[in-house]
Image: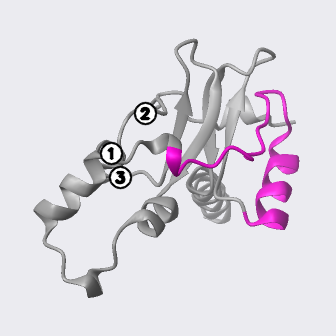
Amino acid sequence: MLKVNDLMTTELFTLSESDNLKMARSLMDLQRIRHIPIVNADREFIGLVTHRDILRATISQLADIDPATQGEIDSGIPVGEIMRTDIKTITENTSLKEAATLLLDHKYGCFPVVNEKNGLIGILTEADFLKLTISLMEALEQNDD
């Protein structure tokens, strides 16, 4: 049986709750990610910032604010103020079927993967399941040939 450990991403980009919104936005843009786990000094998972959270905290483009001004505003907002803390986590031994069912049923975009001490060890995203689906479809196509 496949487990979360078989699919999760372990090369993580994280921030601390004192890092600012500008850093989070830059990290998401540079790394092309939509979820940033927030950890404390002991690398324990304490929250999550999503692309949607950042959009929600951004002044509307309808306000006609230039990017430099938006950057200044973002620099003054710690991610701890916008992060979500009510995030469901899973362990590396959770079955992939269970994780996929939870993502689908609850419309989650990701699961932080933690150890028994709540230390962040990985993240499992919708994109990971799409990659798995593509691999499985390619394997099926090769069997058809």
Q: At x 78% / y 44%, what residue is drawn?
A: 88
Marks 3/2: CA–CA distance: 11 Å
Other-residue count near label 2 (Cα within 10 Å), few / some / many at <14 / 14–19 / ≥20: some
Give the structural element (helix, strand or loop) at label 2.
loop
Query: In the displayed image of the protein, which residue is found farthest to the bottom?
Result: 62
**Quadrant location, the N terminus:** top right
Q: Marks 1 and 2: in contact by CB < 8 Å?
A: yes
Q: Marks 3 and 1: in contact by CB < 8 Å?
A: yes
Q: Which residue is mark 2?
A: 13
Q: At x 63% / y 62%, what residue is drawn?
A: 137
Decide: is 16 above or below 22. Answer: above
Other-residue count near label 1 (Cα within 10 Å), few / some / many at <14 / 14–19 / ≥20: few
The amino acid sitting under disc 2 is Phe
Front-lying residue, 28 or 80: 80
Q: Is residue 91 magenta?
A: yes
Q: At x 54% / y 34%, what residue is drawn?
A: 38
Q: Is residue 104 left or right of residue 110?
A: right
Q: Is residue 72 left or right of residue 44?
A: left
Q: Which residue is mark 1?
A: 31
Q: Is residue 55 left or right of residue 123?
A: left
Q: Using the image, tell me which numbered label, if any, was put on residue 105.
A: none
Which of marks 1 and 2 precedes in the sequence?
2
Location of residue 63 by image quarter: bottom left
Q: Position of residue 85 (x, y in %)?
A: 68, 43
Q: Which residue is mark 3?
A: 32
The amino acid sitting under disc 1 is Gln
Q: Is residue 54 left or right of residue 40?
A: left
Front-lying residue, 99 or 77: 77
Q: Position of residue 8 (x, y in %)?
A: 63, 36
Q: Position of residue 12 (x, y in %)?
A: 47, 31
Q: Is residue 84 magenta?
A: yes
